[in-house]
Image: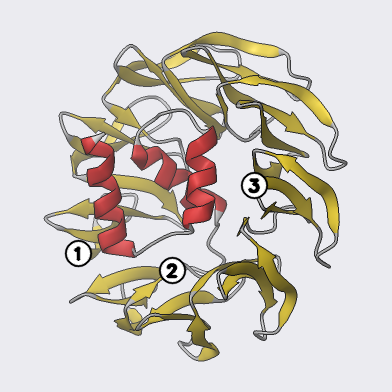
Amino acid sequence: MMKRIGALSIYLAVFGAINISCYQQVTASTPKSSYENKINYLLRNYKLSTPLYRIVQNGKYGYIDKTGKVVIRPQYDLAWSFIDGLAQVKVGDQYGYIDKQGRKVISPKYRLSYAFANGLALVMIDFKYGFINSKGKVVIKPQFEGALAFRNGLAAVQVEDKWGYIDYTGKTVIKPQFEAALHFYEGLAAVQVDNKWGYINSDGQIVIQPQFESTLKFAEGLAAVQVNDKYGYIDRAGKYVIKPQFNDAWEFSEGLAAVQVGQKWGFVNANGEMVITAQYDKAINFSQGLAAVKVNDKYGFIDKSGKMVIAPQFDLALAFTDELALVYARGGAGYINKAGEYIWNPTN
């Protein structure tokens, strides 16, 4: 637990708070894997829409381009990635949005705000969650105790102590009835009933009965599920494709999934074949042909043959996005390219 708290502290110190409501939902349903993997999940699923990268310098946040050139000077108390052309920033204790030129599109005025997705952003007003459009107009009034961003046309929302789903107009399309609910991916969403996880379709019908201790989203046609203390993979019909046998598991990406055997991590293919032997202390899924792995308390990167292409040297490393990867070293956060060269030296 201390290691997870430490990783959380690093992330929050360098990048600021994330959507806590969303994170709680993620951690409620994902395997008890390394916090680095959960961060990676969130980063991948809030995909960047432009190659600008957050930096922190002297405690303030700004942005660089892919070459390491500062394009928006560090000036914000917190900042997040650009999605749909906008990024939320914090000034004092208020949240707002800027465009890629650093112009204030929506002035900081929200107690909490989250990334735009499909043209709408989740905000908190008077301790309730609602949605605004890119002009800052409230289009779904704040009325929910909790909410997640829109994915595939639907957003999970909490009414009192139950979760359901709304559409872009705010209409309830799946009535609140679940203990917890996650995003739709590949047509299915994980929901919790009687402390067990299963999956529903977009009509709200349970298509895979709640029976798992934890689940991950469907990716590349498969989803990791936990039965007792082991993890395996099911298909969209709920049939086991890879029987529960791993101590931990992560979603498929680029044809491979990180799995834990004993205390070590390796990678399996969709047939359950161990194609990269379990030998790492931690592993983050492949992105753009490379995966971060931890060896003797340091992170490096391997390719799909298992060859170490960037030597272990970082205290923390996340997935490559737009040819750059976020790394933490020497007490700060920086970015490297696929050659392992710093584009932005670690700063804090």
Q: Residue at x 19, y 64 (%)?
A: 345
Residue 11: x %, y % from top left: 30, 55
Crowd band around label 3 with a 10 angstrom C-alpha radius: few (<14), some (14–19), many (20+): few
Q: How is the image coloured?
A: secondary structure
Q: Which residue is mark 3?
A: 161
Q: Amino acid at mark 1?
A: Asn
**Quadrant including the N terminus:** top left
Residue 65: x %, y % from top left: 39, 73
Q: Residue at x 56, y 76 (%)?
A: 86
Q: In the image, is residue 276 above or below residue 288?
A: above
Residue 98 visible in image: no
| Residue 3, picture quadrant | top left
SS type, badge 2: loop
* Residue 148 located left or right of residue 13: right
In the image, 113 versus 15, the foreground residue is 113
Q: In the image, is residue 65 above or below residue 174?
A: below
Residue 192 visible in image: yes
Between tags 3 and 1, which lies in front?
A: 3
Crowd band around label 1 with a 10 angstrom C-alpha radius: few (<14), some (14–19), many (20+): some
Q: In the image, is residue 337 above or below residue 116?
A: above
Q: Amino acid at mark 2?
A: Trp
Q: CA distance from mark 3 to mark 1?
A: 45 Å
Decide which of tag 3 and tag 1 comes sooner along the chain: 3
Q: Which residue is mark 1?
A: 345
Q: Residue at x 38, y 80 (%)?
A: 93
* Residue 333 located left or right of residue 39: left
Decide which of tag 1 and tag 2 comes sooner along the chain: 2
Q: CA distance from mark 2 to mark 3?
A: 29 Å
Q: Which residue is mark 2?
A: 80
In the image, 201 versus 330, the foreground residue is 201
Between tags 1 and 2, which lies in front?
A: 2
Q: Amino acid at mark 3?
A: Asp
